[in-house]
Image (cartoon, helix red, strand yellow):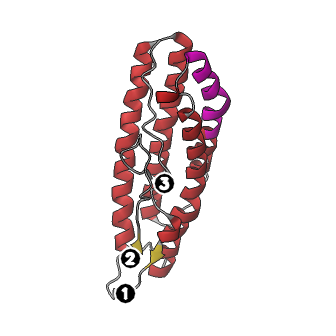
Amino acid sequence: MNTLLLVSLLVSSILTGSNPNQMQVNMTSSEEPKTSVNATFEEQQEAILQFINVDVARVSSYEMEAFDSLARVSGENYTDDETMYLELVENTIPAYEKALAEAQNIEVQGKELEEMKKRLLEATGTFYEALLLQKQALEQQSKELMNQSNLKLDEYFQLVDTYHLELELLSKEYEVKYEKNSEKTEESDEGFM
């Protein structure tokens, strides 16, 4: 079976899209956005930094592990379905399950970050579904299931784009400098979360 696989995914800092070393608070404006009911402006800035630099970075590390695993057996590195299947089952999916669990365990402060967590969960859940469809496609030798997996990947990238846009807007509102990671691979056309 020809594998239609996905790995234009290999990007660094997949879920954060930001370089933690470049995240900083810029407190030059006297105009403060509306903050969560119980959080001050500064507390919300810190919460945003915690979310991006710590919480999402943990998710990203497992996601990168999964993407690296998948890249070893797909695209130009594809050799056969059995090798790909074993890598998916033994390494890729377990690593991504850790990313998903980390995303689910993030505790956030404020309504704005609750929305960002929802977006993060939706994106990671969608990618996980794509991996499971890919596994099933290999088991059943189904081109249709592989196509469905690829459609899930397209959905995942759209969700990631929305996530970045909204996180960038939130960061601006709270005067936190947010920069997507500029590192790219030959196979990727854009950084991720």
Magenta region includes residue 85: yes
Question: As shown in the figure, which amino acid type bears the numbered disc 2?
Answer: Glu
Q: Is 28 in the magenta?
A: no
Residue extending farthest to the right is 90
Whether pointer 2 and pointer 3 mark residues with C-beta atoms closer than 8 Å, the reply is no
Callout 1 touching callout 2 (CB < 8 Å) = yes
Would you say residue 93 is visible in this rendering? Answer: yes
Q: Nearer the viewer, residue 38 or 62?
A: 62
| Magenta residue span | 80-95
Residue 25 as seen in the image, left or right of residue 80: left
Magenta region, main secondary structure = helix
Decide which of 157, 85 is in the foreground and name it: 85
Depicted 108 relative to depicted 128: above or below: below
| Residue that mark 1 sits on | 28
Q: Amino acid at mark 1?
A: Thr
Q: Nearer the viewer, residue 20 or 160?
A: 20
Which residue does the image show at 63% across and 39% down from the upper left? Answer: 95
Give whichever of discs 1 and 2 has the lower sequence position: 1
The type of residue carrying mark 3 is Lys
The spot of residue 157 in percent (x, y) is 38, 42
Residue 74 sits above or below residue 82 on the image: below
| For marks 2 and 3 on the same chain, the one whose residue lies earlier in the sequence | 3
x then y, percent, for residue 45: 47, 75
Q: Circle 2 sits on which residue?
A: 175
* Res 97 label: none
Q: CA distance from mark 1 to mark 2?
A: 8 Å
Residue 38 visible at all: no
**Residues at marks 3 and 1, CA–CA distance in whole angstroms:** 27 Å
